[in-house]
Image (cartoon, helix red, strand yellow):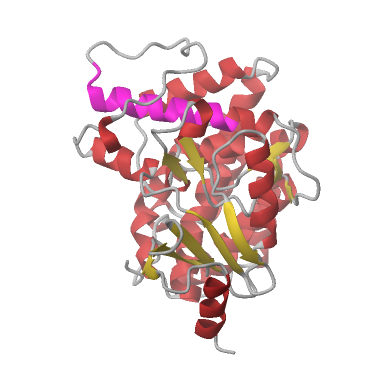
Amino acid sequence: MTRSAQIAAFLARHGYGGAQAAPLAQDASFRRYLRLTGGPRSAVLMDAPPPEDVRPFLRLAEHLAAIGLSVPEIIAADAEAGLVLEEDLGDALLSTMLDAMAAGVAGQPDKETPPRPRLDPSPNPRPQGEGAAAGTASLLLDSAVDVLVVMQCAAPPPGLPAWDAATMAQAALGTLLDWWWPAAFGAPAPRAARTDFTAALDDMLRPIAAGPVCFTHRDYFAGNLLWLPHRSDLRRIGVLDFQSAALGHPAYDLVSLLQDARRDIPSALADRALGRYLAARPELDPTAFRAAYAACAAQRHLRVACQWVRLALRDGRAQYLAHGPRTWRKLAEALRQQAAAPLAQAMDRWIPPGLRANPKGLTA
């Protein structure tokens, strides 16, 4: 049976045989999403053929819903076929809203106001004269931080893989040395460079190895969060793309949110949100957490800056290279932090500043 026939049979079994399908934005995986109209209710089809595996998504959707968060309700699923029919949560991505505000377009869907902060404001008040768009952005980030706190403080489901210091180091080494390096230098990375970067990442990520462990989304950024104005409290934030969740340090997801590789979050808003997070987690040592936050930022930006190259060369998705300049800039900012000194020193030994960019000849 062809894939098209398999999908048609699945939809027919669940009342969507006559539905019209329109593609939704695709992420960096090989899954695709189709919005279905004309069925019993608006829904989204996740088409994730092998080797994609939808079982983690189904298991984690159940977990996140059980702790009170908004995730797509599963209408039907065929795990073996890699097909999931899920609730349509709409198009109001926080990424779209934040980008519009950054461009000077205030307002949001249905002219609803975001929820008031559930926690006391951070110790750093907003500057006087802050515009409505900036105020809305800070409240949206507040809401995302509040959801993250609940997600992390709940007991994680069993069976999550590790996103620990060793795994994080290997992930960054893979994109840097196996993809970016040959494209930038025209030759494989020397063994000495691999040894040096391995030691540097191990040293930098030592605070991660010694720190707390919790549910880690691993891609908790505005493009995977929705604004649901007709819901209340924490449920006004819809959470997507959680199938790669693991057990990791709580700083990692906060870096993903506040140091987004795809858009600039003003430093004042990011600092305020970080303060809010720490106020909600008094059990965490702020100094140790900030060191782990800086280390996670350097690891993530290095991995992702080089991942854009892998997506372009391996998967033919050169459009992701457009995010390269921002990601390398964020990496440079992260490397100025004391906690990132081991990686900064390795970068200085092996990669001249002028080469810290998308490799020449690769364009979006």
Front in this rendered view, residue 299 or 199: 299
Q: In the image, residue 56 lies at what x, y percent? A: 69, 57
Magenta stretch: helix, strand or loop mostly? helix
In the displayed image of the protein, which residue is found farthest to the bottom? Answer: 1
As drawn, 84 above or below 5: above
In the displayed image of the protein, which residue is found farthest to the right? Answer: 158
Q: Quadrant of the N terminus?
A: bottom right
Determine which quarter of the picture holds residue 151: top right
State the residue at coordinates (63%, 48%).
61
Does 133 appear in magenta?
Answer: yes
Does 358 appear in magenta?
Answer: no
Q: In the image, residue 212 lies at what x, y percent? A: 74, 31
Which span of residues is magenta-colored? Answer: 130-148
Q: In the image, residue 318 lies at what x, y percent? A: 38, 69
Q: In the image, residue 343 lies at what x, y percent? A: 59, 44
State the residue at coordinates (32%, 68%).
363
State the residue at coordinates (60%, 47%).
218
Front in this rendered view, residue 87 or 126: 87
**Total labels drawn:** 0
Q: Is residue 296 visible?
A: yes
Q: Quadrant of the C terminus?
A: bottom left
